Image (spheres, rainbow, N blue to C red):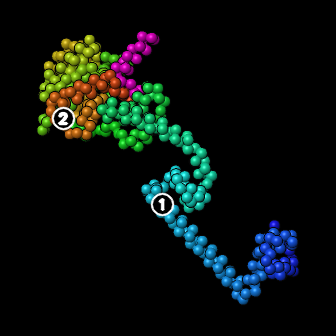
Amino acid sequence: MGTSKYSPEFRADAVALYHASPGRTYAAVAKDLGVNHETLRVWVREAEQAAVPGAAESNALEKENRQLRARVKELELEREILHRAAKYFGGRDELVSRFTFVADHHDAYGVKRLCRLLHVSRSGFYRWQQAAPARANREHADQALSARIAEIHEESDSTYGSPRITAELREEGRPVNHKRVARLMRRGGIVGVHLRKKIRTTVPAPDAAPVPDLLQRDFTALAPNQKYVGDITYLPVGDGQFLYLATVLDLHSKRLVGWSIADHMRTGLVADALRAAAGTRGSLHGAIFHSDNGAQYASKEFAALCGDLGVIRSRGAVGTSADNAAAESFNASLKRETLKGAKRWPGARAARLAVFRWVTRYNTRRRHSALGQQSPITYEQRSTTLTLAA
């Protein structure tokens, strides 16, 4: 209890009694008076100070000095904390970073002081702290998922981006969100292969017989072996040399059913690719084959081959790459994912093997966004199964 219930006279008499009882302790005198011994000690000290001229002012000044020294000490401590925090954040200043700093240093400086200096709420910090086990579990799951993402990326020859990796994970039974996959890929520095600059290889035939455009940029087909597109693309090798790749792509499944590589761009190149497609399908009779107006596709030799195979020819407008966009997109993907940023292959053999490996993976394993992230052959098989079931 306070001392206000005691009158000034009582307090003065108590002090006088203490001074009149030499040898007696504060406790003994206080017991006789029925007061606390610390209360009696305060009364005696105040009386002695009052008896000394200027003592009250001196005590007040000393108290103020003590407060100032304490404030200076507190400011120095706060400066030290902020200095450590600046190094700790390392250029980051997210709320989570501040909470982490409080968690790591609260034993030394106290939660209240740290939250005040870092401008975060204590309640928010405690909620964040309580969620630590859940965060640890998520981080553990992210680490395991990141490891699998890295494996899938490596299995794809470092070509897959987040959409295809997400599809691969979902097929494995992991119901993962594509945004989470993209975030973990960014954190791990994992990136897919990006588009390369296109170099045009089409050389129009000035005297080509007119052939109608039967696709009109509709690069879809209701079933396999109905519509095909083809094109020629260059494969840079060695010191300035080139190989050339001709392709035949099914527009229903995006499957590459025929292809041919040579060191020339004569009609035989595209003819070999179309013959390979006929061998894969068994027959191309009644199917449409669409190409650009390159001299190879406009030649009499190629027209005769199409007639022998029962293939209906279709060509886009001269100088308009969009009329054969599906074939050109395929060629761009092939070179992007085989060269991986390099300008050329070291030699013809390396180029042939790289293309062969990629084409095989493309048909059997590589996921295609237009097919619901399925490979071309898987898509064909499932389409056939659904048709038979119907």
The x and y percentages for residue 307 are 20, 14
Q: What residue do we see at 35% from left, 39% from top?
A: 191
Q: Quadrant of the C terminus?
A: top left
Residue 84: give its label. Answer: 1
Secondary structure character of the magenta stretch overall: helix
Q: In the rendered structure, does residue 373 fall within the stretch colored magenta?
A: yes
For residue 20, side relative to residue 224 (left or right): right
- Span of residues in magenta: 372-390
Instruction: Name which of mark 1 and mark 2 comes first in the sequence.
Output: 1
Which SS class for mark 1? helix
- Residue at 83% across, 73% down: 29
Which residue, as the protein is rendered here, is positioned at the far bottom? 53
Which amino acid lies under the numbered mark 2 shown in the image of this protein? Trp
Which quadrant of the view contains residue 328? Answer: top left
- Disc 1/disc 2 C-alpha distance (Å): 52 Å
Left or right: residue 254 versus residue 85 is left
Q: Amino acid at mark 1?
A: Arg
